[in-house]
Image (tube, grey):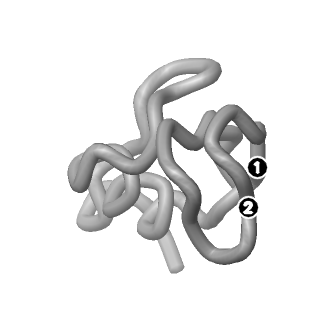
Amino acid sequence: MSVKIKLTRNAGGNQAGDTITATPKAAEHLIDAGYAEEVKGRAKKAEDTPD
């Protein structure tokens, strides 16, 4: 399962404004840290997603 997010800052070799796919846990971390914003719906909380 993956989540689409749009970066608001340069991160992981990607430029601000890039839309990337990430695991739900990574997306949640990047959004909460202010490095990304949701594209479609909010990344689920890590404890709510199966591994």
Q: Nearer the viewer, mark 2 or mark 1?
A: 2
The reply, left or right, for residue 50 in relation to residue 6 is left
Q: Which residue is mark 2?
A: 14
For the residue labelled by badge 1, is the local secondary structure a helix, a strand or a loop?
A: strand
Q: Which residue, given by chain and number where applicable, does mark 1 sit on?
A: 20
Task: From this view, report whether residue 44 is shown above or below residue 25.
Answer: above
Q: Secondary structure at mark 2?
A: loop
- Residue drawn at x 31%, y 64% is 46
Mark with earlier residue (2, 1)? 2
Q: Which residue lies at the image location 46% right of the left edge and 31% below the top edge?
A: 37
25 above or below 43? Answer: below
Looking at the image, is 38 positioned above or below residue 24? above
Q: Amino acid at mark 2?
A: Asn
**Three-letter amino acid code of the residue under disc 1:** Ile
Tell me: 21 left or right of 44: right
Determine the image quadrant of residue 49: bottom left
- Percent from the top left, x then y, of residue 10? 57, 57
